[in-house]
Image: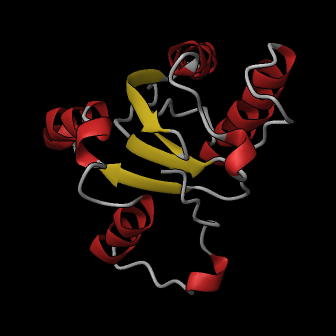
Amino acid sequence: MSTHSEIYIQIIFAVNGSDSLIGSHWENELYKFITGIVQAKGNKMLAIDGMPDHIHFFIGLHIDCTLADLVREIKKSSNAYINGNKFTKSRFSWQSGYGAFSYSKSDIDTVVKYIMNQKEYHKNQTFKDEFISFLKEYDIEYDEKYLFNWIDYK
């Protein structure tokens, strides 16, 4: 018998410092690049979007792919892609760590709409407040000193 699964994960990670803000003029190229990595590893990209200081993407995770390896590859490869194309004036990098939150199949439409509406959503809520609300919703214990370094870019 073959193995089957349905695993839906939203992944969130942040840029490392104000010198690494994601520019509106190149964010779509970054999202296409990350989508390519996700798909090359056998996963399905359901949605990707973000803000200058962080990104969200929502995937159907393939049973043979480990989340930690996927995120490590995306960060490493996208750092090289951004720096190689000189999208930022200084060296780009992502902060260490990430958030990963699971969903059921019935949540797919809601999560896709949420991610694709990030620009509008963040008119009323900071990244810090958003991320902490995810941790609370999933009952994840945390110490604020181990969370992201929040960037005020406005």
Q: Quadrant of the N terminus?
A: top left
- Whole-percent x and y of residue 151? 59, 59
Q: Which residue sits at x=47%, y=85%?
A: 141
Left or right position of 96 against 111 = right
Residue 70 picture location, percent across and down: 66, 36
Q: Is residue 101 left or right of residue 76?
A: left
Residue 69, image quadrant: top right
Relative image position of residue 87 (x, y in whole percent): 73, 20
Q: Position of residue 7 (x, y in %)?
A: 38, 40
Which residue is at a point 53% across and 45% down the rendered structure image?
54
91 versus 154 height, above or below: above
Q: Is residue 34 left or right of residue 51?
A: right
Q: According to the image, what is the colour scheme of the structure? A: secondary structure
Residue in view at x 60 percent, y 20 percent: 30
Quarter where residue 39 is shown: top right
- The mark tally for this picture is 0
Report the front residue among 14 and 124. 124
Q: Vertical placement of 106 versus 135: above or below?
A: above
Decide: is 80 above or below 52.
above
In the drawing, does residue 132 fall left or right of residue 40?
left
Q: Is residue 86 visible?
A: yes
